[in-house]
Amino acid sequence: MNILVINCGSSSLKYQLIDMNGEDVLAKGLVERIGIEGSVIKHDTAGKDRVVIKEPMKDHKRALELVLEAIVDEEHGAIKSMDEIGAVGHRVVHGGEEFADSVIIDEAVMEAIDRCIELAPLHNPPNIMGIEACRELMPETPMVAVFDTAFHQSIPAENYIYPLPYEFYEKYKVRRYGFHGTSHKYVSLRAAEILGKDIKDLNIVTCHLGNGSSITAVQGGESIDTSMGFTPLEGLAMGTRSGDIDPAIIPFIMNKEDMNFDDVNELLNKKSGVLGISGVSSDFRDLEVAAEEGNERAKLALDVFCNRVTKYIAAYSAQMCSVDAVVFTAGIGENSASIRERVCDGLECLNIIIDKELNNVRGKEAIVSKALGAVKILVIPTNEELMIARDTLNLVNNR
Ligand code: ADP
């Protein structure tokens, strides 16, 4: 079966068409600037040249129409007709407490996703637009929603309840949800496969280090704690997000700088993290270059980032009593040997010992720990699209 995977942002749409027989990507692409001037699709079909389609796209429905045309196009398409798309898998950011797993989309599911808008006001609405556009254009094709939060619904209450008055949880569902769940699930399953072990027997710390970063403790295949919280702002220092800070800093700064809630939200989400510390960039490639050239604040930003990652790995190892594997994934985790090395330098006391030679890899699967270290360290490129497609196939086959 061919499965179309859709990931909609407010003005963007990423897609992949995957043939599940061999899990081969037949076509993939990115639509940008939906609803604004300069809309463009960059479409790649396996074995063919890239096609760039520039046409006005007033909404996600028009964008998707053009994507589907590109996919079935006689010349640069991947399949002959839309009938060859067996199902569509949609990435949905927030499933709240409503969804602990992926689901076939029906009216009740749409209503539940709608109820979660309050928890993800920037993310769920474009996800819903993508689903609605697909349902209009492909009314007979089954659709599945795969949630970023679902994998973390196994987290026990002692790890998801904040030390705030309990009524905020009851009234407003203020609790830890966690994000990047599809990625943490994919890399933990893949780690078990690579190690030739049953995931039920493994304690794994998965480190998704990208623009946004999060770390998860995966015990026996289930998330038992994760660093992002009620929103993706908590936890590690990120490109532009602060991660954990003393909450009392917020009223202090608001008072000193005469800021309102929108200002402070913008400050913590867009102007903080390694960008805020360094004043150089949110991109780790730029920071590594600047640090090498002697920029002290870039160096400090990298130190803060790495120390936080080290701390979370150690904390989650302790929480699971022991750890069998540490996995690095996403832009930084997959590509930056130096950050992996610095993170692990602080963890030798836990038998997490990196091999500098083996660690010299970028963007491909590898075991990079020293043979004598009890804990395996792995680099595993994440593949959220494939995870979404697999969930979609499973649900559609078992209807
Ligand atoms: P997103 O969270 O947007 O999916 P990615 O997982 O693609 O992000 O990660 C993007 C980040 O990865 C970039 O901002 C950059 O900091 C980092 N990155 C990519 N390649 C490298 C590299 N070779 N060295 C260091 N950092 C890198």
Image (cartoon, grey):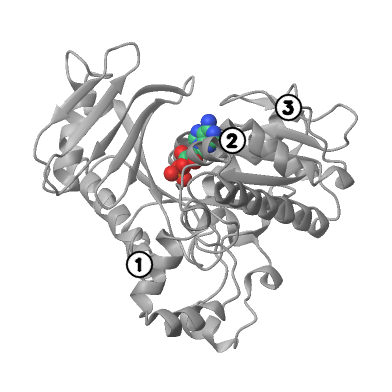
Say if 197 sits above or below 302 in the image. above
Say if 44 sits above or below 99 in the image. above
| Amino acid type, label 1 | Ile
| N-term mark: 3 or 1 | 1
Work out which quarter of the rendered image holds the N terminus and state it. Answer: top left
Find the residue positioned furthest to the left.
56
| Amino acid type, label 3 | Ile
Instruction: Measure the C-alpha gap from mark 3 to mark 1.
Output: 40 Å
In this rendering, position of residue 303 left or right of residue 353: left
Q: Nearer the viewer, mark 2 or mark 3?
A: 2
| N-term mark: 1 or 2 | 1
In this rendering, position of residue 237 left or right of residue 375: left
Graded by Cα atoms within 10 Å as few (under 14), some (14 to 19) or many (20 or more), the crowding at tag 3 reads: many
Please give the residue where the numbered disc 1 appears in the rendered image.
Answer: 117
- Write the residue at 46% across / 48% down: 280
| Amino acid type, label 2 | Glu
Please give the residue where the numbered disc 3 appears in the rendered image.
Answer: 367
Secondary structure beneath disc 1? helix
Q: Nearer the viewer, mark 3 or mark 1?
A: 3
Secondary structure beneath disc 2? helix
In this rendering, position of residue 51 left or right of residue 310: left
Q: Is residue 388 visible?
A: no
Q: Is residue 30 visible?
A: yes
> Do residues under tags 1 and 2 come within 8 Å of each other at their CB atoms?
no
The label on residue 292 is 2
Instruction: Measure the C-alpha gap from mark 2 to mark 3.
Output: 27 Å
| N-term mark: 2 or 3 | 2
Secondary structure beneath disc 3? strand
